[in-house]
Structures are given as C-alpha cells and as structure tokens.
Image (tube, rainbow, N blue to C red):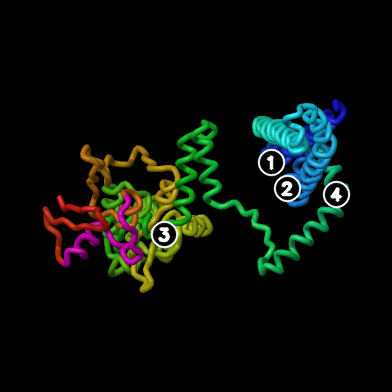
Amino acid sequence: MLSELLIILALTLANGFFSGSELAIVSARVGRLDAMAKGGSRPARQALNLAKNPDRFLATVQVGITLIGTFSAAFGGARIGDILAGWIAQVPALEPHAETLGLLIVVVVITYLSLVLGELVPKRLAIQNAERLAVIAAPVMTVLSALTRPIVGILTLSVAGVMRVLGQRVTDDDAVTEEDIAYLVREGTESGVVEREEARIIERVFRFTDRPVSAIMTPRTQFTAVSVDQSLSEVMDVFKASRFSRLPLYEGTIDHVVGVLHVKDFISAFASGTDIDLRAIARPPLFVVESLHGDDVLFHLRQQGAQIAFVIDEYGQIMGLVTIEDLIEELVGEIRDEFNRAEEPHYVKREDGSWLIDGLEPYEKVAVRVGLPRDEERRHTSLAGVIMDELGRVAVVGDTVTLAEHVLEVV
C-alpha cells in the first residue's frame, strides 16, 4: 500500500506544481521579468512569453490538472479503496459497508491532500514569490505547452464550436480598464507601495481626461484683457497691476479677441518710444470649443506652442480662457509663485460640515467638489447663475435653494 500512497502523493504534488506555476506566471510583474530577460535570463524570457500569451499556457495547465485529478481518483478508488475495504471487512459490524467506507476514506484523504498540497500551499507560495517561481516553472511549462499543443488546439476549436452553437462570439478581451488601474492604485496606497500624493495625481489624470475645458477655464467675467484702442502707457499699467505675463487683446468687445500680448514683446515696443498698433506685436490667438476635454486642449496648446487658449461656445462667443498652468494644476494641484497674490479660498469647509463657496465658481466644478447633482445644461453656468435660475430672479442675502437634498443659502 505504501507504493500506492507514494503515487497519490506524487500526483498531488504535480497538481500543486501546475497550480502554483499558473498563478506565479500570471501574477508575476512583467516589468521585472522583462528586466531579467534583458539581463540574459532564458527562463525569465520563457516566463515572459508565457505571460504575454496566456491562452495556450492556461489551457496546458488545465489539461495537466484535469488529467492528474482523473488519475488520482481512478487509482485511489481502484487500488487503495480495495485495500482499505479489506481491512474494514475484518470488523464484523462494518463488513456490509466495507467497500463504501473504504471509498469514502479515500475520497476524504485525496480531497484533503489536493486542497492543501495541490492548491492552497502552492498558490500561497506563488503569490509571495511570483517572479522567482515563474522563472523556475517556465522551462517545464514551455516544454509541456509544446507537447500538448495538438490537444490544446482541439480543445480551442471545440470551445469555439460550442460558443457558435450557443450564439456567442469568442473574443479576446484583455484590455485593462480605468477601474482596474484605480483598484491597483488603491491597493498600492494601502500597502505603502504607492505614495498618497502619487495616487492623487493618478486620480486627477483620470478626472482630467473626462472634464470639459469649460469646467477648468477662467470665465470671461474674471480674466483681465486690454483693447486695441488703449495706449501703450495704459496697457503698461494693466501689466503692472495684474502682474500677468500675457494679456488677451480684443477689438470692440471681448468676443472679438484678435491676439495675445506677451509682456516681453510689449516692453520692447514700449521702450522704443513710438506709438505702434498693438495688433502688430500680438501673438495669434488659439480658440478651442467648449466640449473639448482637458487633455485635448493641452495637446492643442503644445502643438501650437501657445500658453493661452480661448474657449468659445457653438456661436463663437468667448466663454473664458484656459492656460497651460490651469491644466497642469488640474493634475498636480495649485501652483503658486512669488507673484501670486494671496487670495481668499473659493471653498471653505465650516465646522458644521457646510461649505462656503464663491458664487462665481463654475457650477460643474462645484458639483464635482462637493457632490451636487451634475447637470449637462448647467455645466457652463456659475453657481450664482444656477441659484438665480432656480429663484427666477436676482438672489439676495438669505435666499435658499434646494437641489437634490442639498440646501444652497446666499450669505
């Protein structure tokens, strides 16, 4: 009976090798394997090939595990079960049930060994030492994958045929989703692998690519601009007062922006002492539509070598402007330099849990920040505009508006 037990144990350990190899190769970090492969490790290169082409490899593992399970059940039931039944039959009271009891003992023992030695322990080792075990298992799994190729091919065709009969299409869906990355970032943050600031930046990147530029821009009522009719000295005063390096230049009304004045170009013209047309020294303006997302606007700014883009609506009217700094701040948070004046915060969370918010803030930005209901028709409107729209008149101190259980009070 000892030889039979050793065979069962060997089959169980073989099952453990397949289970551990599967998890190790699938969960091994591709970057680490790639680095080892470039360093000359042939097993690492084999593990990388298996990880990058999982379908055939996983089918090979499944074939191996299925065959081992079949052999263990057949061999254990046929040989060890009969031996145990003979021993049990020596007890008169158990003799009528000897065969059943022998088979039951075999099933319990083989199941226990398969779970502990064939599944749980190998997989725990694979999780803790993924790259190391992947490199050890890769040469064997590469050979087995080649040997079982005909069987795997037949199985693949069979699965495809059954799927067609069921009216289902066989597709390869290996795309990594935004939710997958967000989950990994959360796990990495909790384990300490990813810094919290890194996690915040990654979160902002996802939000950045989904946010329309209208939620990022500075509204037209809040940016400083100069007219082509102003004198050089007047424009100089505006540059000094605003401390901006660039100013929008318009003709007639702000909806007719004709360029962007750069302080360096302006100072050179101002120093010449001649009265020149401001349009002659202005840089061409860049216009973007309100529906573009932040990453699209950043692409256009970089492509045009511009620092400012003017946001227009469907009628061509200026809604606001956005700078590269605005877009970068969406990713990394507020950037302040020595010329930034201290400003009152636009959002203040009070002790009672309520928020004190600047009414000129875009409603879309407020909704994202404090959880107000999103409204596509109002995403270009200020918070004050939404309140007055709900009231149907100009708001006064003390007015309140309720939006989806959120109470907005004018103070």
Judging depth in this view, the residue of 405 and 386 nearest the camera is 405
Residue kind at label 2, given as amino acid type: Lys
Residue 289 appears in which quarter of the rendering? bottom left
Q: Which residues are magenta?
A: 371-392
Judging depth in this view, the residue of 145 and 259 nearest the camera is 145
Residue mark closest to the camera, 3 vs 1: 1
Residue kind at label 1, given as amino acid type: Val
Position of 36 compared to 244: left or right? right
- Give me the disc on residue 30: 1
- Give me the disc on residue 52: 2
SS for dot 4: loop
Does the magenta segment cover residue 360?
no
Residue kind at label 4, given as amino acid type: Thr
Q: From the image, tell me which residue sits under label 4.
A: 148
Whole-number angstrom distance, CA of label 2 to CA of label 4: 18 Å
Q: Earlier in the sequence, mark 2 or mark 1?
A: 1
Q: Earlier in the sequence, mark 4 or mark 3?
A: 4
User: Is 290 placed above or below 86 here?
Assistant: below
